[in-house]
Image (cartoon, grey):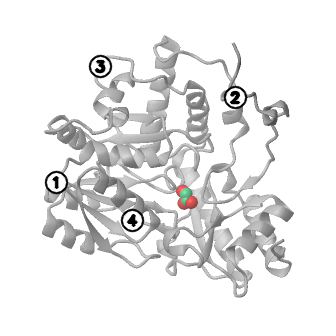
Amino acid sequence: NTEDVRAPASLETPLSVPNKMLMAAGPSNLTPRAAQAGGLPSLGPMHPETFRLMDEIKEGLQYAFQTKNPVTLCLSCAGHGGMEAALANILEPGDTAVMCKNSFWFDRASDMATRQGARVVPIDVKPGQPLTLEAAEEAVAKHRPRLLFVVHGESSTGVHQSLEGFGAMCHKYGTLLVVDAVASLGGTPLYTDRWELDVVYSGSQKVFNAPPGLSPITFSPRAMEHIQSRKTPCPVFYYDVLSIGDSWGCFGKRSYHHTLPVTLFYALREALALVAEEGLTASWRRHQLAAQRLHDGLERLGLRLLVEKPEHRLATVTAVLLPDNMDWATLLRTAMARHAVDLSAGLGPTFGRAFRVGLMGTNANPKAVDRVVNVLQDVIKNPIAAA
Ligand code: GLV
């Protein structure tokens, strides 16, 4: 037999990956413990050791989400998949979804919900500000939607969305509350049960310092009751919690759903063990202190934060207005070329206006913060011009 396509010469060279300090909005640096765990031998999706691993991850996630929800698991996809799964499991064609519109994530979520046949009603909120409970209630009372969508850790603008009272308010009107906690889970307080959140999803690559590719998600009993009584099945088989929940043992048995990315599970299991060892409250406090140190350092450099009120600032991602006479590409290029420090450009409403710094997991420490501030001082003084 002959080959029509030749083996590529590019694969003859050894794999080479630089070590960068990942201080952008994500992913964050892997902890050595997560990285090593990811290199352990593979296991099959129906092996008893895999079931035990999944049970341990579930318990770690219940801790991180602060929930007793039995339907707590990990989807084999990025946080975007978590968003798509949350919406696809709750929405049916013709349903109304009310969504806070103050960020890039509104664009994504409303696109997904519209593709799923829902009618999206935006609540307009100025980027850089959170949604108030009053504005949310006005929209929910008026439209009686199937769901209200909010982003807890709004990474495109650096806003911390308070969730207290939102769940109880939604439930008064028969609405389910869907929360994006991709950039916040583990780094800032979140109480799924106490705050009556119905679906919450996150990502493995942010505060947990695990590899990208897993999306933790939890469904409240109220959300499950709705899902079990849908008129139409979830439109995406891969994301249908009624079937993937079976592979996670959520409904009392175990069945094959898809070939699970077990080596990613090892890494997440170890990441969750680190969270449990430190304790969530200690982690929340560490992120808060690191963010305060960063914000003070940025202000000393004469930089301004996009989010004006300190109480609305997210600990894990900070949006910083671009200094005069500096474009985002020059800033990011200089930080990377001279210091191997990764920062994010603006996204959605902050594109071209701000850059973003992430303090996630082990990167939320005083040494890392001081390094970023020193790097920014140098970048502002000596930017590298475009080639
Ligand atoms: C990704 O999550 C980002 O906020 O850039």
In the rendered image, residue 302, in percent from the top left (x then y), is placed at 71, 85
Label 2 CB, ligand 1: below 8 Å?
no
Residue 162 numbered tag: 4
**Residue lying at 46% horizontally and 38% vertically, measured from the top left:** 61
3 or 4: mark nearer the eye: 3
The residues bearing labels 3 and 2 have C-alpha atoms spaced at a distance of: 48 Å
For marks 3 and 2, the one nearer the N-term is 2
Kindly check if marks 1 and 4 are in contact, taking CB atoms under 8 A apart as contact: no
Residue receiving disc 1: 94
Residue 111, image quadrant:
bottom left
Which residue is nearer to you in this view: 70 or 226?
226
Q: Measured along the vertical axis of the image, is residue 103 above or below residue 28? A: below
> Of the numbered discs in the image, which one, if any, rests on residue 252?
3
**In the displayed structure, does residue 277 sit left or right of residue 57?**
right
Give the x, y percent position of residue 343.
69, 63
Distance, label 3 to label 1, CA atoms, is 32 Å
Q: Which residue is denoted by mark 2 in the rendering?
A: 5
Which callout, 3 or 1, points at the residue further toward the start of the chain?
Answer: 1
Q: Amino acid at mark 3?
A: Gly
Q: Which residue corresponds to the image point at 34% horizontal and 46% vertical from the top-left?
A: 86
Q: Is residue 57 above or below residue 191?
A: above
Q: Quick check: 25 left or right of 231? A: right
Query: Which structural element holds mark 4?
Result: loop
Q: Is mark 1 within 8 Å of ligand 1?
A: no
The answer to which of 312 and 115 lies nearer the viewer is 115
Q: Residue 83, image x and y in percent?
A: 40, 49
Quarter where residue 211 is shown: top right
* Amino acid type of the residue that numbered disc 2 sits on in the rendered structure: Val
Which amino acid is tagged 4? Ser
Sequence-first disc among 3 and 4: 4
